[in-house]
Every structure is written in C-alpha cells, then in structure tokens.
Amino acid sequence: MAVNKKLLFVVNPKAGRTVIRNDMINIIEIFSKAGYSVEVYPTKSQDETEEYVYSHAENFNLVVCAGGDGTLDNTVGGIMRLERKLKRRIHMGYIPCGSTNDYARSLRISMNPVQAALDIMEGDVCHVDVGRMENTFFIYVAAFGAFTDISYTTPQNLKNALGHAAYVLEASKTLFNLKSYRMKLWFDGEIIEGDFIYGQVTNSLSIGGFKNVGSKDMSFSDGKFETVLIKTPENPLELQRIINCLLIDDLSDEMIVFRKSSRVVVKCKEEVPWTVDGEYGGSYKTTRVSNIKKAVSIVLKDKSSVIS
C-alpha cells in the first residue's frame, strides 16, 4: 500500500507493567500497512510531551499515544491547545499501557497494545467531552481531599508491580489523617456550602482502577460532569456509614452530595491541592472546572461506550 498519510506516535516507554517496547515493531507495522508514515516520539516529561504535541501534531493526519492516563492527558492537552489555534479538529487514538488505564476501560479500548492498534486502524472517529480546570485540560477526573495524592505520591515501581493494590496500600496510610475544607460551591447556578473531606469531578466509569461512584447514568458526550462531595464525618461511625454507602453506590445519604453539571466553581479560604487525571494539578483558593462538550475526536472501534 502506498504511504500517503502521516501518523505521530507518542510513546511513554516507562508506563505501567506493559513493556510497550516489546510491541513497538508490530504496532508500527500495523500503522504502516494501513498507509501511514510513522514518526515516533518517546516522552520525556509531562510538560515536554504536551508542548511537543502542540508544536508538531498539525503536520500529521493522526496522533496516537501509548502510555497511561497521564500520557493521554498530556497528549489531549497539546491537541486541545492546537485545535484552538488552528480552528480545526485533530484526530487521535489511544493505546493504554498504564497501571490502571481508567479512561481506556471506560471507553472499552483493548488492554492488549497490538489489538488496540488494530482497533484504531479499523475504528471510527467519536467526539468525547474534555474537562478544563483553570488553565489545565483533563480527560476524566479532577479531585481534592482524602486519598487524592495517592496516585502521584505512590512510587512508579510500586504502581507497576502491584497495580491497583498500590493505591489501596497507600490509602490505608492516610485513613486517619483526613483534612476538612470549608467550601462554597456553585453548580450551574445552584450554591452549596459545607465542610468536606473529599470531592471529585469526573467523566469516567472508574477511578484508580475501581468502579466510579455516581457513574451509572454518565455519558462521555453530554457536556456534563458527575460531581461527588463527601461531608466531614464527626465520628468513626459516621465515616463508616459513608464508606458503606459508597461501596454500594448509594449517594442518597445526607453526608454525600451528588450533582451533574457542566460547570463547577469551588471557593475556599485556604489553598486546596487538586489532582488532575492522577497527577498533581495545583493548589487554589478558587477553582473553576468546566466541561467542553465533544471537544476531542478519538478513534474507537467500540462506539457503544460513547452515548450521544
């Protein structure tokens, strides 16, 4: 087949348990047989990856990233910035190689890198929502409070060796050190005030490898996030009640706030540290989170996961 298309292959060689380098030749061969001239970019750092995609993706017909959620996040960030500059869409594909791959599981992307590459070549373009927190884009979660620092404080070698168990082990260390934040929040006009130990704004079926609470009726393309807030418990029994409700995805308890909205504004008198797609996302007294509807064009073989 004549080569007449160009593909930028963004690869994180250190992501997850899967050694992507073992599959590189097979994957590049799949792209080449589909008519693509392939340029490989091995990632070096988060900022550098986003900047490289922003500076170079304009010259390619398709951008494919291979790595974990962080690699996808950086690639999407570069594409989003470039699309705003060019006023046109940049199509992308994703080969999951991380330790949890929350977003890929939600979109039913194959966990086998070679199969994922084949599916991209056989798939169709779907449009999915993207989040923005202040000046940072994110694909599936922005969160604050209890346990949210686990993913970026857990050593990469522990993530690679233990996968989901690493998050559980780290979470157990902080169970008795829950910090409370006095907050005022706006949800598309509605105002809520209270003391909270945890909050998440999500667009995913799973977080940290576990089923995401409040995701039962979620959509990747409706322009809305699912937000869950956990009020500060006054005693161990109240904390256990919250945990029990979360385990069965029961968000009706008075200690839990659940809202669907296109925009969330969070204000606190002290700076609140946030995580964005499992990485540190900055600390803010006022945090503005918005949903950009159908902002990313991603190639999927199984389109049933994207509900319009």
Image (cartoon, grey):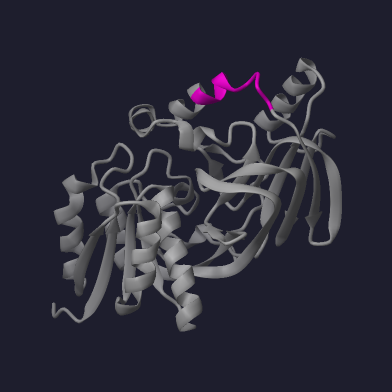
Please tell me in which quadrant of the rendered image residue 228 appears. top right
Magenta segment includes 173: yes
Give x and y (percent) for residue 28. 18, 61
Q: What range of the chain is rendered magenta?
A: 170-178
From the viewer's perspective, tell me whether residue 100 is left or right of residue 186.
left
| Residue at x-position 86% and y-position 53% | 191
In the displayed structure, would residue 87 be above or below residue 66? below
| Residue at x-position 68% and y-position 51% | 226
Q: Nearer the viewer, residue 277 or 22?
A: 277
Give x and y (percent) for residue 21. 19, 47
Give x and y (percent) for residue 205. 56, 46
Please tell me in which quadrant of the rendered image residue 30 appears. bottom left
Magenta segment includes 288: no
Can residue 189 be seen in the rendering of this structure? Answer: yes
| Residue at x-position 53% and y-position 61% | 306
| Residue at x-position 19% and y-position 49% | 23
Can residue 123 be seen in the rendering of this structure? Answer: no
From the viewer's perspective, tell me whether residue 191 is left or right of residue 295.
right
